[in-house]
Image (spheres, grey):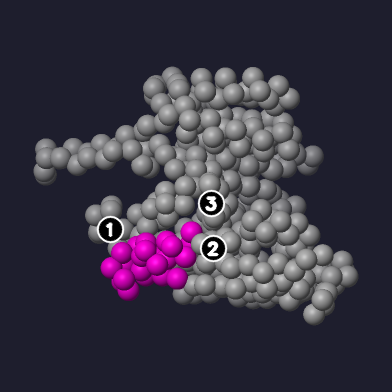
């Protein structure tokens, strides 16, 4: 077995970003010790904090380091302090810029119900049913990046955003979604609003044409309003969901709510170069600095990073097992604690997961390997 020697650029950003990323780093460090790898972490300013320190949300040094890294780990951006800024000067513009500059056109958001959290799901599931789906969100195009305009003023002011998709942009992300479906339960739900939007009509035609190359995958095209309802009524029907940039943003928060907390969900963004990993929960300013955020989304990002960017499958599985273990043992941050239950802090949750990871690594007789 070879030792990995990798550089991870860390842009923890604003709000609860730094707290949950600290937790994820502690897990990666434990993983390096337990399995004999070397990970170097380079922390750089990004988002609102970079606006304050460097005058812009995505300093060129940060971008260049991300380009050269083996993987990028991102916390969250945004906060009330910068909300009055024009769109192009907000922390969010830094996030969109980073996605664009790194060519990250695929965003994968796995949403799974932990068995030990079944009781906190807001919906009723049959005993033999579960939620285990993946949202493949287009990330580099659509209304997030189309031309924007604000004109006129006061009561005559008007504003517009533009959704544009080309066949090529749809095909490259759809291809990835079909491949995920092939590796899973072979069902793909493509989400659009083809009864109203021209860009959605193109989306549907392109995905349906591509499906001819994937005869083993059962493709279903759904309107986004119906998909939002189906998610609440019968989430178990979904395997892989393919969405535009904005529909994926909306539906992934909804799906996260179904499994108990948005704090549990990781994501991976892929393109032509370095991959980026970020929990989907955002900066949650009301929780910032309280050490009470849920670090599991960020920790599961670390697991995805190990598997997808470094090819460390055993290590990734050990991290996921450690998360399962901590939850099964009853440890809960406030967002997933039932009323009357004692909740623990973000750093305590990370510490419990670390211990479970060390134990699980020892079980697989990897602890101390090569040290
Ligand atoms: C997300 C976030 C971002 C998005 C914001 C912060 C720009 O909501 O990653 O889901 O809309 O993509
Ligand atoms: Mn979002």
Q: CA distance from mark 2 to mark 3?
A: 10 Å
Give the number of the disc on residue 69.
Answer: 2
Front: mark 2 or 1: 2
Residue for point 15% across, 40% down = 151
> Which quarter of the picture shows residue 154?
top left
Q: Nearer the viewer, mark 3 or mark 1?
A: 3
Asked which secondary structure carries label 2, the reply is loop
> Percent x, y for residue 78?
38, 61
Of residues 92 and 215, the one drawn nearer to the viewer in this rendering: 215
**Residue 140 image offset from top left, x and y in percent:** 44, 43
Q: Is residue 230 visible?
A: no
- The residue where tag 1 is placed is 89
Q: Report, in whole angstroms, how far the alpha carbon at label 2 lies from the one at label 1.
A: 26 Å
What quarter of the picture does the N terminus occupy? bottom right
Answer whether residue 115 is magenta in the image. no
Which sits in the foreground, 3 or 275?
3
Answer with mark 3 or mark 1, whichever residue precedes in sequence.
1
Assess disc 3: are there few (<14), some (14-19) or many (≥20) residues with their C-alpha within 10 Å of its C-alpha. Answer: some
Instruction: Indicate the position of residue 371 as horizontal and vertical percent values.
Output: 80, 80
Rounded to the nearest angstrom, the CA distance separating label 3 from label 1 is 26 Å
> What number is the disc on residue 273?
3
Q: Which residues are magenta?
A: 44-67
Is the residue marked by circle 1 packed among few (<14), some (14-19), or many (20+) residues within 10 Å? some
| 50 part of magenta stretch | yes
Q: Confirm whether residue 202 shows in the render.
A: yes
Total marks drawn?
A: 3
Do the numbered discs 2 and 1 sit on residues whose CB atoms are within 8 Å?
Answer: no
Q: Which element carries disc 3, helix, strand or loop?
A: loop
């Amino acid at each position: 077995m070879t030792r990995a020697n990798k550089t991870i650029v860390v842009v923890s950003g604003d709000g609860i970003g730094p707290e949950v990323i600290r937790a994820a780093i502690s897990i990666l460090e434990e993983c390096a010790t337990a399995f004999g790898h070397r990970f170097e972490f380079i922390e750089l300013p990004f988002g609102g904090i970079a606006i304050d320190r460097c005058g812009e949300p995505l300093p060129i040094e940060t971008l260049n380091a991300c380009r050269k890294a083996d993987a990028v780990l991102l916390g969250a951006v945004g906060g009330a302090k910068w909300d009055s800024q024009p769109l192009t000067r907000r922390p969010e513009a830094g996030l969109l810029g980073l996605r664009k500059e790194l060519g990250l056109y695929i965003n994968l958001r796995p949403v799974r119900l932990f068995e030990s959290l079944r009781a906190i799901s807001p919906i009723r599931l049959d005993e033999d049913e579960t939620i285990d789906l993946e949202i493949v969100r287009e990330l580099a195009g659509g209304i997030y990046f189309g031309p924007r305009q604000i004109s006129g003023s006061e009561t005559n002011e008007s504003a517009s955003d533009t959704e544009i998709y080309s066949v090529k942009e749809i095909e490259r992300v759809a291809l990835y979604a079909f491949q995920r479906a092939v590796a899973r339960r072979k069902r793909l739900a493509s989400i659009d609003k083809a009864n109203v939007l021209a860009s959605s009509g193109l989306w549907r035609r392109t995905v349906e044409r591509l499906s001819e190359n994937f005869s083993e995958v059962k493709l279903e095209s759904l309107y986004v309003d119906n998909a939002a309802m189906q998610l609440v009524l019968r989430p178990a029907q979904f395997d892989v969901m393919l969405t535009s940039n904005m529909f994926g943003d909306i539906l992934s928060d909804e799906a996260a709510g179904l499994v108990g907390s948005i704090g549990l969900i990781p994501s991976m963004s892929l393109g032509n170069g370095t991959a980026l990993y970020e929990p989907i929960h955002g900066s949650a300013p009301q929780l910032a600095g309280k050490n009470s955020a849920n670090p599991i989304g960020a920790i599961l990002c670390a697991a995805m990073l190990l598997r997808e960017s470094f090819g460390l499958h055993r290590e990734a599985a050990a991290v996921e097992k450690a998360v399962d273990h901590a939850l099964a043992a009853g440890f809960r941050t406030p967002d997933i604690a039932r009323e009357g239950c004692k909740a623990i802090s973000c750093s305590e949750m990370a510490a419990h997961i670390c211990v479970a990871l060390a134990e699980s690594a020892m079980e697989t007789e990897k602890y101390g390997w090569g040290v």
